[in-house]
């Protein structure tokens, strides 16, 4: 008989975290879709960035963060120039598939490891991933205000399918 | 020698989830503080709720969700009438301490259990808790736009201490 440590308690498993994130990504995709093409890179309130720029920031953080945690490759893009909504949605869908693939390559213990994201943000892997998800939810919340100010009803917050 | 199952993989442990949430709560408290008293329950954009109402909703979800998960008591409040900022901040601080206390009463396996929050929202405990955190981040993002529209610089998103 050997004495074993109790299993590490999980509030959220790796699978559950991915499912949670992809649910948010489906909602954010609907928010991008809801923007009129001619407002995506022009409409602002209070001097904040237009939603198109925020969507490009999300694209530059999401798949690159998953890749960094999975492989140690921290390449990303700082390109925020206006582009057609169709291109953003296409890149969004490509990232969604890539994140699923990269996630499979993350060993379970990696989520508790200290690392430096993009060469400048130190943190534990799960905190870095949560930061990317929270940044998406935060900026999407701003997108909701922009849509309402444009007279457009945003998609329901609670629908993630 | 005995064969043991590998430990349950944790992307996020119960302690880490609490720490994450309380970091968000410190930031949200600063956003409430940043609102001018006379705009907290009056300023809106696009017909959305003023930030004071959103803060009361957060209060009605946070500690009550932690209590529900910990004890099965799902009582909450639907009171959203205007009140002084000082009262909201005081209740915020009380909830912060209560959430810490309630968290200690949540058995680790509880986070994976199916339950029905407030008698009407079915879900796994960790998803219900994440929903409350995300709802706070989402509405706080709206608060950032309100503050910018009022000419007030919001607190930095990345500071959670």
Image (cartoon, coloured by chain):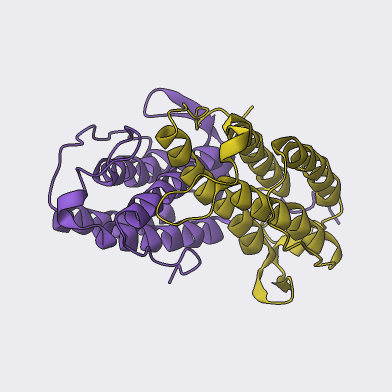
Chain colours: A purple, B yellow
As drawn, is A101 to the left or to the right of A82? Answer: right
Name the residue located 46 percent from the left edge and 26 percent from the top edge.
Answer: B153
Residue furthest toward the top?
A: A120
State the image coordinates of residue B133 (x, y, percent, origin top left): 61, 51
Q: Is residue A81 above or below residue B11?
A: above
As drawn, is A87 to the left or to the right of B145? Answer: left
Which residue is at the front of the view, B70 or B63? B63
State the image coordinates of residue A77 (x, y, percent, origin top left): 23, 35
Name the residue located 60 percent from the left edge and 37 percent from the top edge.
Answer: B38
Quarter-of-image position of residue A94: bottom left
Which residue is at the front of the view, A15 or A146? A146
Name the residue located 62 percent from the left edge and 31 percent from the top edge.
Answer: B30
Quarter-of-image position of residue B151: top left
State the image coordinates of residue A98 (x, y, percent, origin top left): 30, 55
State the image coordinates of residue B146 (x, y, percent, origin top left): 46, 40
As drawn, is B134 to the left or to the right of B60? Answer: left
Position of the C terminus of chain B, as image quadrant, is top right
Quarter-of-image position of residue A156: bottom left
* Residue B41 in view: yes
Which residue is at the front of the view, B3 or A27? A27
Q: Number of marks in the image?
A: 0
């Amino acid at each position: 008989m050997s004495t074993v440590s109790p299993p590490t308690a999980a509030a959220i498993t790796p699978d559950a975290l991915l499912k949670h994130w992809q649910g948010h990504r489906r909602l954010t995709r609907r928010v991008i879709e809801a923007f009129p093409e001619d407002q995506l890179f022009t409409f602002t309130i209070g001097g904040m960035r237009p939603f198109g720029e925020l969507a490009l920031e999300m694209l530059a953080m999401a798949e690159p963060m998953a890749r960094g945690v999975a492989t140690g490759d921290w390449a990303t893009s700082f390109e925020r120039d206006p582009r057609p909504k169709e291109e953003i949605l296409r890149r969004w869908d490509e990232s969604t598939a890539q994140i699923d693939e990269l996630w499979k390559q993350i060993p379970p213990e990696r989520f508790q490891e200290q690392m430096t994201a993009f060469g400048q943000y130190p943190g534990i892997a799960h905190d870095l991933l949560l930061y990317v998800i929270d940044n998406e939810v935060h900026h999407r919340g701003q997108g909701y205000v922009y849509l309402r100010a444009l007279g457009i009803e945003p998609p329901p917050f609670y629908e993630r399918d």
